[in-house]
């Protein structure tokens, strides 16, 4: 049994870890890690990042304390760890910084809402002006590589989409990374992304233009309840989004069925909620357990694949599930006959 002093030391380490990620978020949001691609004094760094020199000095001192920066006299430079938080760095650690601040925000909201039971919905994601612009890049950095390495080669629906020169719709597209990945891999695929946040649409459109894919991929405002397609499409994707509308899943799947051509498919990618509660103590699922609390604030909860398959069958789809990430991620494909 741990002593009180041992538990205190453990919690102090956890608290410092939380502080370090919060500090990293300040640097990520204000472009300080990127601006330090070349060493700089405080004044030079403030000028590069176009931020206040007083705040920059205090951030540099704290970043030095936590090992993100080294210093020679008045010149600061990134350590290896600090460089890994650059959003442009391969395998960037930026998502951990963004998630840490989002977690604190959702914890504060859950604490305040618990007595009343109020569940204000997805608008809570837009309550912090510094978080929303990073939500799409955070998801892209967290999942795009996994999608391209693991999911895309394994799930046969994507190659079929390319063979028929099909149109894919991404509901809740974020910054458009999913459609960009499809269009980059498959030359015959066209894509339409819909999202409820204008910031996401702006980011998606600009990134698609930079990638040279604007002739085949476009984005427009729309949410998961109110959207239209100009003609029947070949694939509708919902990436980590179905649980946001699960309270109306019968209506959602009926609309998806109607939007698809015969032989088309709906592709649902969801975190896989475990059947056994004991699995939540697995290090790979602890974050999911907390996130399910934040999902409750938004009026949602995570799902099991069998729930999704049953809803698909009821709507007329023929479902099949693929599991990835040691069973922590589920892709459920429902084909329209």
Image (spheres, rainbow, N blue to C red):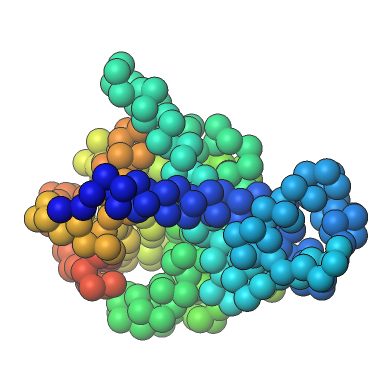
Quadrant in which the C terminus is drawn: bottom left
Q: Nearer the viewer, residue 23 or 337?
A: 23
Q: Is residue 58 visible?
A: yes
Q: Quadrant of residue 49?
A: bottom right
Q: Where's residue 304, x and y in %?
A: 17, 54
Residue 109 versus residue 16 in the image, above or below: above
Image point (21%, 62%), residue name: 282
Q: Nearer the viewer, residue 288 or 2?
A: 2
Q: Where's residue 5, x and y in %?
A: 31, 48
Q: Quadrant of residue 175?
A: bottom right
Q: Residue furthest left?
A: 276
Image point (45%, 58%), residue name: 169
Report the side of 117 relative to 197 (left or right). left
Q: Residue furthest top?
A: 116
Q: Nearer the viewer, residue 108 or 273?
A: 108
Image point (35%, 75%), residue name: 151
Q: How many marks?
A: 0
Report the side of 143 relative to 114 (left or right). right
Q: Quadrant of residue 327?
A: bottom left
Residue 121 versus residue 263 in the image, above or below: above
Image point (61%, 51%), residue name: 23
Q: Where's residue 222, x and y in %?
A: 51, 42
Report the side of 90 relative to 290 (left or right). right
Report the side of 288 relative to 236 (left or right). left
Q: Is residue 216 visible?
A: no
Q: Where's residue 255, x and y in %?
A: 32, 45
Q: Nearer the viewer, residue 8 or 27?
A: 8
């Amino acid at each position: 049994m741990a002593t009180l002093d041992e538990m205190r030391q453990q919690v102090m380490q956890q608290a410092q870890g939380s502080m370090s990620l919060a500090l990293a978020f300040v640097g990520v949001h204000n472009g300080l890690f990127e601006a330090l691609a070349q060493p700089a004094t405080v004044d030079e760094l403030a000028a590069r990042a176009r931020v206040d020199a007083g705040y920059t000095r205090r951030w540099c001192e704290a970043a030095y304390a936590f090992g993100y920066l080294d210093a020679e006299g008045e010149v600061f430079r990134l350590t290896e760890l600090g460089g890994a938080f650059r959003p442009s760095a391969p395998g960037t650690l930026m998502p951990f910084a963004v998630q840490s601040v989002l977690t604190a925000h959702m914890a504060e909201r859950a604490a305040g809402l618990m007595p009343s039971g109020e569940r204000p919905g997805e608008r809570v994601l837009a309550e912090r002006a510094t978080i929303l612009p990073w939500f799409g890049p955070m998801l892209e950095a967290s999942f795009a590589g996994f999608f391209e390495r693991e999911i895309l080669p394994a799930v046969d629906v994507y190659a079929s989409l390319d063979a028929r020169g099909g149109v894919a719709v991404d509901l809740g597209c974020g910054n458009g990374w999913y459609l960009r990945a499809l269009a980059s891999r498959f030359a015959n695929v066209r894509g339409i992304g819909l999202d409820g946040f204008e910031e996401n649409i702006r980011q998606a459109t600009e990134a698609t233009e930079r990638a040279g894919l604007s002739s085949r991929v476009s984005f427009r405002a729309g949410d998961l309840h109110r959207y239209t397609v100009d003609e029947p499409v070949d694939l509708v994707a919902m990436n980590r989004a179905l649980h946001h509308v699960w309270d109306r899943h019968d209506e959602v799947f009926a609309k998806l069925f109607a939007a698809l051509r015969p032989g088309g498919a709906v592709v649902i990618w969801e975190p896989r909620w475990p059947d056994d509660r004991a699995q939540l103590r697995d290090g790979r699922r602890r974050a999911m357990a907390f996130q399910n609390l934040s999902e409750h604030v938004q009026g949602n909860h995570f799902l099991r694949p069998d729930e999704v398959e049953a809803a698909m069958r009821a709507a007329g789809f023929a479902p099949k599930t693929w599991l990835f990430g040691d069973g922590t991620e589920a892709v459920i494909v429902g084909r329209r006959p």
